[in-house]
């Protein structure tokens, strides 16, 4: 299930012969993948798909999955969801740890991938009152995760946008312009 530009759920599997590949957003938690993904999808008149939302729709809240079954189980569910959403047409947001999976990184090799980054102080502000399991250690835990994953984000990314300073709408316009150029090649 995806959010169409107007917000209505749709299911649009890409026809490999005619459809453009999805535009994929990666980055750490609090980098703005969901917020910016929705903006870019609206600007490009595309559906928006969030892999974390797909996991929650099928299996329940992510914090409960972590608590009940552990991170390893969650990562298996995440890999399955990512495999499905990368076959859809639109703007796709992946969870911050999705790039840990080698198969996911291989799937991203031929797709336009945007790495959204954010400065730690901005991430700390955005994560206030979060229930995200890997954010429970605060900004120190976030910073450690970010540094542990940074090489993987860079490995699969075609371009990087920092979401720390500029407003979401202007970043969205720049990202949509970049994506349009990539998807029409």
Image: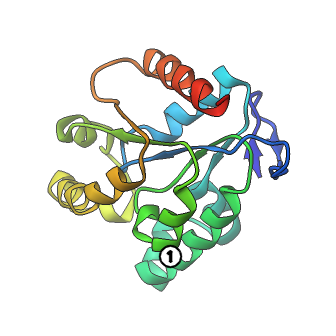
Residue at (69, 45) in percent of width and height: 21
Circle 1 residues within 10 Å: few <14, some 14–19, many ≥20: some
Residue at (32, 38) in percent of width and height: 126
Viewport quadrant of the C terminus: top right
Location of residue 51 in the rendering, given as x and y in whole percent from the top left corner: 59, 56
Task: Give above or below for 182 relative to 3.
Answer: above
Residue farthest to the front, as pictured: 185
Residue at (36, 43) in percent of width and height: 30
The answer, for residue 107, to whether it is visible in the render is yes
Residue at (58, 48) in percent of width and height: 111
Task: Give above or below for 176 relative to 27.
Answer: above
Taking 36 as reference, is 2 left or right?
right
Location of residue 148 in the rendering, given as x and y in whole percent from the top left corner: 23, 63
Taking 37 as reference, is 155 left or right?
left
Location of residue 39 in the rendering, given as x and y in whole percent from the top left corner: 58, 26
Residue farthest to the left, as pictured: 140
Q: Quadrant of residue 77?
A: bottom right
Query: Relative to the observer, which residue lies in front, 15 or 37?
Result: 15
Location of residue 71 in the rendering, given as x and y in whole percent from the top left corner: 41, 78
Task: Give above or below for 161 relative to 123.
Answer: above
Task: Give above or below for 165 relative to 41.
Answer: above
Residue indicated by mark 1: 74
């Amino acid at each position: 299930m995806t959010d169409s530009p107007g917000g209505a759920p749709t299911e649009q599997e890409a026809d490999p012969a005619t459809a453009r590949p999805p535009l994929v957003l990666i980055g750490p938690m609090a980098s703005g993948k969901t917020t910016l993904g929705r903006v870019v999808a609206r600007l490009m008149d595309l559906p928006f798909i969030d892999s974390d939302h797909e996991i929650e729709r099928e299996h329940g809240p992510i914090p409960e999955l972590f608590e009940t079954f552990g991170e390893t189980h969650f990562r298996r569910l995440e890999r399955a969801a990512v495999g499905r959403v990368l076959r859809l047409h639109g703007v796709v947001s992946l969870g911050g740890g999705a790039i840990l999976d080698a198969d996911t990184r291989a799937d991203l090799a031929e797709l336009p991938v945007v790495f959204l980054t954010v400065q730690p102080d901005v991430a700390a502000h955005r994560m206030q009152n979060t229930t995200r399991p890997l954010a429970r250690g605060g900004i120190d835990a976030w910073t450690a995760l970010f540094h542990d994953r940074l090489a993987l984000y860079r490995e699969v990314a075609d371009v990087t946008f920092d979401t720390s300073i500029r407003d979401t709408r202007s970043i969205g316009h720049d990202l949509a312009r970049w994506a349009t150029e990539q998807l029409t090649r």
